[in-house]
Image: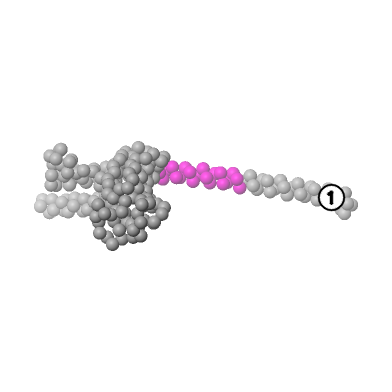
Amino acid sequence: MKLVVGVGVRRLWALMLVVAAALPAARGVWLNMPSSGRKCVYEELRSNVVVMGDYYTFYGDGDVNYTANPTVNVKVSSPYGNSLYNKEQSRHGQFAFTTNEPGNYVACFVVDSNDQSGKIVTVGLEWKVGIAAKDWDSVARKEKIEGLDLEMRKLQDSVTAIGERMIHMMSREMEMREVNNRTNNRVAQYSQGSLGVCILVAMIQVYYLKRYFRNKKLI
């Protein structure tokens, strides 16, 4: 009996490790900003997904000082161009939203035109999606759970999120397959139509040449 329990526990922990490896984690990026123009990051998301972002600016030397660092203009947009967050002359900020429609959600940064330091401006962005954006401390206090129970709750929500992600990917795969099939059918129809036109033109040319040679009494 002890051996069976030990194997079960090892399998449980192995499953937990596999699921944890597949969890969507927070993504951190550094953007070296151009003196003019903008840089954007985007991610394709499905509907009803919680997104949180935390950004800060600093010069290329790496010293982060929220009162002396460069300022940037920040805009976060939905796939249809709706503004979800817009702030000008910001050194540090946070944004959060829940997606309403599937597609590419974009966060764009532009260096403030008043910056004349000549230094390289860098924007650090931490982008959290889904489970990674959930406030587990609040969940633990609200539901009065901690330790292993809290970890199991995280894994349960993570498995649910992974299942929803797989269903979304399968639906996208079916949509892409339908698009490919329609495209193949249209290409086949275009090819058949082009071949028919070529045959018709060739027959007209043969008829015209035969008539021309007969009129010239060459045949």
Whether residue 210 sits left or right of residue 173 in the image: it is right
User: In the rendered view, how is the structure colored?
Assistant: one colour
Magenta residue check for 177 = yes
Residue ranking furthest to the right: 217
Question: Image quarter for residue 30?
Answer: bottom left
Q: Secondary structure at mark 1?
A: helix
Q: Residue 107 at x, y = what percent?
A: 35, 47
Who's the residue at 56% across and 44% down the image? 186
Magenta residue check for 38 = no
Label count reads 1
What predominant SS class does the magenta segment belong to?
Answer: helix
Report the amino acid beneath label 1: Tyr
| Residue placed most toward the observer, 184 or 87 | 87
Q: Residue 27 at x, y = what percent?
A: 29, 52
| Residue placed most toward the observer, 188 or 109 | 109
In this view of the protein, can residue 166 be seen by the observer? no
**Residue at numbered disc 1:** 212
Who's the residue at 12% across and 39% down the image? 144
Who's the residue at 23% across and 43% down the image? 134
Question: Image quarter for residue 156?
Answer: top left
Residue ranking furthest to the bottom: 61
Q: Residue 87 at x, y = what percent?
A: 32, 44
Q: Which residues are magenta?
A: 172-191
In this view of the protein, can residue 154 be seen by the observer? yes
Who's the residue at 37% across and 46% down the image? 106
